[in-house]
Image: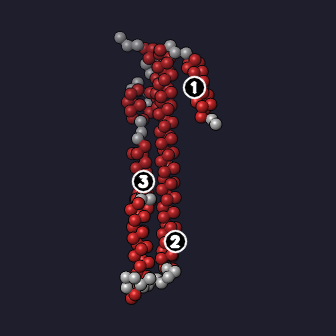
Amino acid sequence: MTDTAHTPLNCPACRVIDQADGLEDGNLFATMKRNVRDERRIFDALRDAQDRAADLITSFAGSLNFVYLHSVWFSVWILLNIGLIGASIEFDKYPFGLLTMIVSLEAIFLSTFVMVSQNRQAARADVRAELDFETNLRSEIWSVHIGHALGVDPSHVEEVVRTAIEGSRRELSP
């Protein structure tokens, strides 16, 4: 014996959930499962080779290995050019104009890679926010449905929620 009060055609909450995939077919759980999206898969699908390269460079530039490598590089450069390793190897005499130019160019490129990575992180945050919204909407629909089935008074629940939010805000405010 089936309960016709909770079929997708008779229950407003079920109808909303069932129609989420654009097809009212009575298969609520398949709809929910099909519409749950994974942020990492979406984001990885949007990445191209340039984005991956920018992320790798930014990741390396933000590491201690980058600092160690540059410390060794600058030390060797300076030792070579002040003549401590061999006077005949000097190619950029003090005040090291070539080194200054190379470091300046590196800073320009690294700052560009950092900005590219920041833009990608902002895009990732947007995808995450969209997925969070979808999850919250689904949770709200399910909560209303379950509350209705249990005979819970929605106005009472909303009043309790408002009171909890106001109390939380009072505790967080200076």
Q: Residue furthest front?
A: 84
Q: Which residue is mark 2?
A: 104
The amino acid type, in three-letter code, at marker 3 is Arg
Q: Nearer the viewer, residue 166 or 85?
A: 85
Q: Is residue 79 left or right of residue 167?
A: left
Q: Along the polypeptide, which appears first: circle 2 or circle 3?
A: 3
The amino acid type, in three-letter code, at marker 1 is Ala
Q: Nearer the viewer, residue 136 or 37?
A: 136
Labelled pair 3, 1 in contact (Cβ < 8 Å): no
Identify the residue at image location x=50%, y=31%.
137
x and y percent of residue 74 in the render?
43, 73
Q: Residue furthest bottom?
A: 88
Where does the C terminus fall, quadrant-wise? top right
The amino acid type, in three-letter code, at marker 2 is Ser
Residue 164's disc is 1
Q: Along the polypeptide, which appears first: circle 1 or circle 2?
A: 2
Please say if 106 is above or below 30.
below
The CA distance from mark 3 to mark 1 is: 41 Å
Badge 3 density bin: few <14, some 14–19, many ≥20, Cα 10 Å: few
- Visible in this render: residue 131? yes
Q: Secondary structure beneath disc 2? A: helix
Labelled pair 1, 2 in contact (Cβ < 8 Å): no
